[in-house]
Image: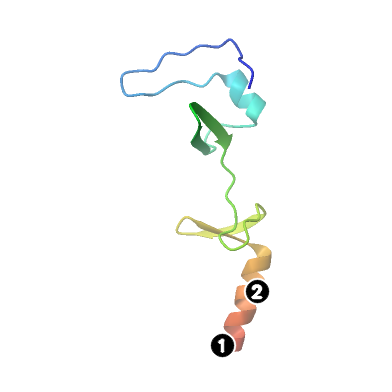
Amino acid sequence: MTSTGIVRKLDRVGRVVIPHEILGYLGIKVHDFIDISIDNSNVVLHKFEPGCVFCGSHRVTSGHKGKFICRDCRIQIHSIAQNVY
């Protein structure tokens, strides 16, 4: 990782403002979700992209109660459901 030379101070509740330039570089826009993780002693930010709960595909087409599913898995589930009933 390279340093950008931008330093920010945490506020008293642990928040930090991520500079607009960095958000733009990462392709993160206002109201996007960010995945925050730890790698060794580094905090890592990624733009959150939901994946299908069944196959992991990022071509998610629908969601329900915070779970996401792609078109292919939705079709397979629909086909299985029709055969069961």
Would residue 22 be found to the left or right of residue 17 on screen?
right
Q: Quadrant of the C terminus?
A: bottom right
How busy is the neighbourhood of tag 2: few (under 14 within 10 Å), some, or many (20 plus)? few
Which element carries disc 2, helix, strand or loop? helix
The residues bearing labels 2 and 1 have C-alpha atoms spaced at a distance of 12 Å
Residue type, numbered disc 1: Val
Placement of 8 over or under 65, stated as above or below: above
Q: Which residue is mark 2?
A: 76
Placement of 62 over or under 38, stated as above or below: below
Residue type, numbered disc 2: Gln
Quarter location, residue 83: bottom right
Placement of 82 over or under 11, stated as above or below: below
Q: Which residue is mark 1?
A: 84
Residue at coordinates 61% horizontally, 76% vertically from top-left?
78
Residue at coordinates 57% horizontally, 81% vertically from top-left?
81
Which element carries disc 1, helix, strand or loop? helix
Image x and y of residue 19, in percent: 55, 18
Q: Which mark is residue 12?
A: none
Residue 62 vs residue 3, the one in the foreground: 3
Whether tag 2 and tag 1 are in contact, CB under 8 A, the answer is no
Image x and y of residue 61, in percent: 63, 58
Would residue 40 be found to the left or right of residue 26 on screen?
left
Quarter location, residue 75: bottom right
Q: Quadrant of the N terminus?
A: top right
